[in-house]
Image (cartoon, grey):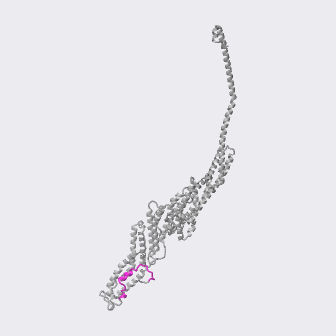
Amino acid sequence: MVVGVAGMESLSVSEKAVKMRESLLKSQTITDNVVSILGSFDHRLSALETAMRPTQIRTHAIRKAHENIDKTLKSAEIVLTQFDLSRKAEAKILRGPHEDVESYLEAIDQLRRNISFFSSNKGYKNSEVVITNANNLLTKAISKLEEEFKQLLVSYSKPLEPDRLFECLPNSMRPSAGSPGHHGDPAHKNHSEQNSDLETAVLTPPTLIPPRILPLLHDLAQQMVQAGHQQQLIRIYRDTRSSVLEESLRKLGVEKLSKEDVQKMPWEVLEAKIGNWIHFMRIAVKLLFAGERQVCNQIFEGFDSLSDQSFAEVTTSSVSVLLSFGEAIARSKRSPEKLFVLLDMYEIMRELHGEIELVFKGKACSGIRESALGLTKGLAQTAQETFGDFEEAVEKDATKTAVLDGTVHPLTSYVINYVKFLFDYQSTLKQLFQEFVQGDETNSQLASVTMRIMQALQTNLDGKSKQYKDPALTHLFLMNNIHYMVRSVRRSEAKDLLGDDWVQRYRRIVQQHANQYKRNAWSKILQCLSVQGLTSSGGGSNVGGDGGNSSGVSRQMVKERFKMFNSQFEELHLKQSQWTVPDTELRESLRLAVAEVLLPAYRSFVKRFGPLVESGKNPQKYIRYSAEDLERMLGEFFEGKNLNEPKR
């Protein structure tokens, strides 16, 4: 019991001390009890914590379990979504691509994503089964896709009619503007002008497959490539497009001809086919092959090597048919008439060279490019050799058919036309000579070839002129032919190449033969009009009706001279009116040259000795012609009259 403060004051000191000790003892006891109680609490709390720990662990596990359940549910949802997408993709694939190709392609892409998903999550039960089933379905899908690609390609791949191709050409190159076989004909449009037209022409390839179909074919091709079906893709494309391309060329007129076929053909037929071939080459490369390359590039966009390979396989057969004909011509027996078609063929190959390199680009087409280049070089080589053959053939031409009237020989006109036509090909010949001659010698090379051909012709004409028994006709023949050479050169581009010196030299040769003709044809008749030999051997005058004049000239001798002149002139007139000088200017010049010698001599002879005859009997028997008659008759010389024609 606690003593109050008032009670404490009434106690003694000893009592106070006892009371304080008792209080302290009680306080200690209380403290000890509190400590004891607190210690007991601590023990109980520790025991409680120990008891609570399993509960905390279970709570954490439950929370983790909930989290795992959430994750599992989410994963299951993803898996279920993939299964659902697979089911939908499978349904689309089983229906096939024909109704909706784009949806079909989306289904294939989805199937591939599903395969990728399950391949990277193989922990799921039955993942392998799912992957296997999906792969099998994908294989079937690609197979159907191949069928669809083929069906689409076949449906929209049709051979082109020639008219469709001709519409892509400029008017000057269309058949209506001239037959394709006109090449090599000297009468056709100037060659250099024609080339200029072709070089400036812009050709747009025709549409081979509708543009709206190409993106779809590209998508189908892309799926096939992703599935590893490149070879099947190339095979389908090649089989479909190559046959269509070949049929387009066949409709155009391209034929498969062997070397034997070419060798057996008559030249007229072969020449026409060569002209057609040139036309076909231009259309094939610039239109058909260029159009095919565009289609190929669009379908195989993103797969350059496949594009090149497919294009090569589609075009190889068609290119081979075209090039093999050219090769057969290049390797066939050479002849002069083939030179210009060889140049035409060489020309078209040169013209198409850049486009061939562009259209047939890539490693897969290297064989085609090499074949085209080989043909170009082969044509150049054959043309070069044909030049040499022609020069030799001109010099050794053994044609026995003589031109009886001394006119221009067919060989001369043929060779000159040949040379003139060569100059229509100057640019082509320069390119050709560059194959064999280095530097700037191509002009001199052409000049050299031309001069050698002219010299060969002159040599041959010299030989042919010896067939004539009459020397006068020999020189008339040479005069006519060499004059034709000179005139033709002067009127053509050959003049600039051969030069004025050549022209002047050959003009002098013409004049020399004209002089030789006059000497051989007229010297004998001019002797009839000379004074020499007219005086009588005794120098005196004859007596009687046949007596001479005061000069001592025998009337009889004068009569004989007139008779001889008349006979020789009539013979010359009969013969030389059948001879021919085809050039009007040269003919008049030659007549004038004869008249300038003959008529003054005749007038002088008649004036001097005519009175002796006129004073006798029948003077017209001896003085049969006046100078005017002779001049008129000279106008009938060199007209090439037929023997059966009535005399004038």
Left or right placement of residue 381 versus residue 612 in this view: right
- Which residues are drawn in magenta? 619-645
Q: Tell which residue pokes out farthest to the left in this image.
A: 550
Q: Residue at x 42, y 72 (%)?
A: 484
Q: Where is residue 481 in the image (x, y as percent from the top left)?
A: 43, 73
Closest to the observer, 462 or 412: 412
Instruction: Tell me where residue 66 sits by quadrant.
Output: top right
Q: Tell which residue pokes out farthest to the front in this image.
A: 6
Taking the magenta stretch, the answer to whether it contains residue 410 is no
Q: Which residue is drawn at 68% across and 30% down?
A: 53
Q: Position of residue 603 (x, y in %)?
A: 33, 82
Left or right placement of residue 20 versus residue 329 in this view: right
Instruction: Tell me where residue 466 sits by quadrant.
Output: bottom left
Q: Position of residue 285 (x, y in %)?
A: 53, 61
Left or right placement of residue 392 versus residue 6 in this view: left
Q: Which residue is drawn at 67% across and 12% down?
A: 22
Closest to the observer, 478 or 556: 478
* Quarter occupied by the C terminus: bottom left
